[in-house]
Image: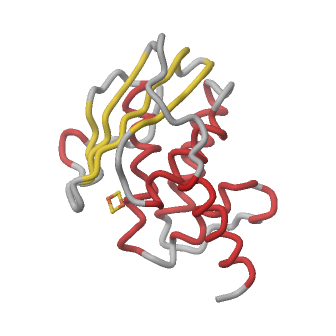
Amino acid sequence: MDDLDDLYQEIILSHNKRPRNEGELDPRDHEAEGYNPLCGDRLKVFVRGGADQIEAVQFSGEGCAISRASASIMTENVKNLGGAELEAKIAEVLEILTSKEEPDIDPFEIGELAALIGVRKFPARVKCATLAWHTLAAALNDKAEVSTEGGEKESTGSVG
Ligand code: FES
């Protein structure tokens, strides 16, 4: 394991241990529940504001360290974003996690989101990391529920 992998792991563990913005935001304008049928874990995302601008965002739920850390990192990265900037951020993260090619991204330019690059090495865990982001997109689209396994409930990550 090289130094970068150590750093990625440290970031994940830190966010899992002390999640940022955990709770059921109240008042809120949007919420959705994300479900990973592979493990049964569920995660809720709550948003004040909307796709034009996220004023506040929180999450709740039981899940593995990667899902909780990804949700925590998400809340810190999307607050105050809206419109094209928000869409681009969600698309960037889904690209980092799911693209077949190694993402052409400098890990030192994307802050703690870089920890998600480390998740690529564990393909079985990628859906743990995408869960929060798909759930955010579902909330902004007023879809009550989204699943990581596709079908009607699947989210594309689009918020428009
Ligand atoms: Fe369930 Fe990771 S094992 S979300």
Q: Is residue 12 above or below residue 77?
A: below
Q: Nearer the viewer, residue 102 or 37?
A: 37
Q: Quadrant of residue 32?
A: top left
Residue name at image x 81 percent, y 63 percent: 108
View extreme (bottom): residue: 1
Q: Is residue 118 above or below residue 143?
A: below
Q: How many marks?
A: 0
> Residue 153 location in percent, x, y?
23, 39
Residue name at image x 57 percent, y 61 percent: 96
Q: Is residue 72 above or below residue 129?
A: above
Q: Quadrant of residue 30?
A: top left
User: Quadrant location of the N terminus?
Assistant: bottom right
Residue name at image x 67 percent, y 62 percent: 114
Q: Nearer the viewer, residue 147 or 16?
A: 16
View extreme (right): residue: 108
> Residue 40 location in percent, x, y?
21, 54
> Residue 51 location in percent, x, y?
53, 22
> Residue 24 location in percent, x, y?
44, 25
Q: Quadrant of ligand 1?
A: bottom left
Residue name at image x 34 percent, y 41 percent: 155
Residue 154 appears left or right of 5: left
Residue 160 appears left or right of 154: right
Residue 128 appears left or right of 148: right
Q: Is residue 124 above or below residue 138?
A: below
Which color scheme is applied?
A: secondary structure
